[in-house]
Amino acid sequence: MIDRIRPITLIVNGKALIVAALAVLSTYACLQLDIKGDFPLTLIATAVVFPIVFSINSAYKRRESVLDDYSQIKAHGRAIYFASRDWLADGDPARPDRCRRLLGNLLRATRDLCSAPRSETTEHETIVYCCFSDLSRFIREDLRAAGLASGEVSRCNQYLSKMLVAFEQTKHIYQYRTPRTLRAFSDFFVTVLPPLYGPYFAYLAAEFSPSLTYLMPVLFALVLSALDNIQEHLENPFDQIGQDDVMINAEKFMDRLAADSLDPSMTELGAQAG
């Protein structure tokens, strides 16, 4: 039950209730003072709905791009891990274990970067690059020194390069979001328009029974505020506030790699499938 209620509280929050209360007060005042007017609704679509929908679509595309980049980091990291485990004849178990730890450090550092305030980006970015450097040295010192063919070492370096590209794209999505002026524009009109449309709601009240007089201003304010809140939660896909955020689960990734290395049946199944 709590899991079903929580998404509602994220989009219908205190701000939405305050805007709805202001719209109701404005409608009440207009009814008492007999101030009525048939305002055009095109202003709402132009000033609020269109900018918010545009921002939601943009934020959703950034989230999907982050998921793609995250999968690239994991996939190419797993490929390097398989190379350390399967491409050398000596079968040294310490080598893939070290690779697993290095990949875990990289994912944790990336998670810390994306969840920290942007004022701390430089500090966390340095740690991420150190993790990439450790992985690069691992390819040179552990894989090549153990006798891995130069062509296969080059392929591992290509995997590392693709991981770097995916990280840079993720970092830029974290740093650059919806233009602030557009967000300020939407916030201003979401807050101001419902109370300003009090004369319009008073005009519509003549067509409703007294018990439904304030239904329209409440719905009007809640719908606009909910759209604005949806956009705000999609804005940062790493803040772990909304249910649609991207979760970088380094621990699960490391556990999965460890489980693969400890389960001999995985290799046997792959051989049978081949």
Image (cartoon, rainbow, N blue to C red):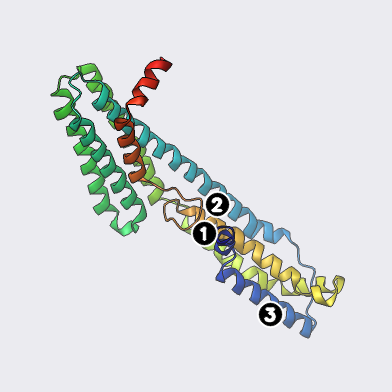
Mark 3: few, some, or many residues within 10 Å (few <14, many ≥20)?
A: some
Dot 2 or dot 1: first in sequence order is: 2
The amino acid sitting under disc 3 is: Leu
- The x, y position of residue 245, in whole percent, is 47, 51
Residue drawn where x is 34% and y is 49% of the image:
111
- Give residue 29's position: percent from left, percent from top: 73, 83
Residue 6 visible, this angle:
yes
In this figure, which residue is indicated by the disc labeled 1? 183
The amino acid type found where label 1 is placed reads Arg
Residue under pointer 3: 25
Residue shown at the point (61%, 61%) measured from the top left: 226
Pointers 1 and 3 in contact (CB under 8 A)? no
Q: Residue at x 42, y 56 (%)?
A: 239
Measured in 3D between alpha carbons, the distance from the residue under mark 2 to the one under mark 1, in whole angstroms, is 8 Å
Identify the disc placed on residue 55.
2
Residue 161 in view in this figure: no
Which element type, helix, strand or loop, lies under badge 1?
helix
Give the alpha-carbon distance from disc 1 to disc 3, as whole Å: 26 Å
Which residue type carries mark 2?
A: Ser
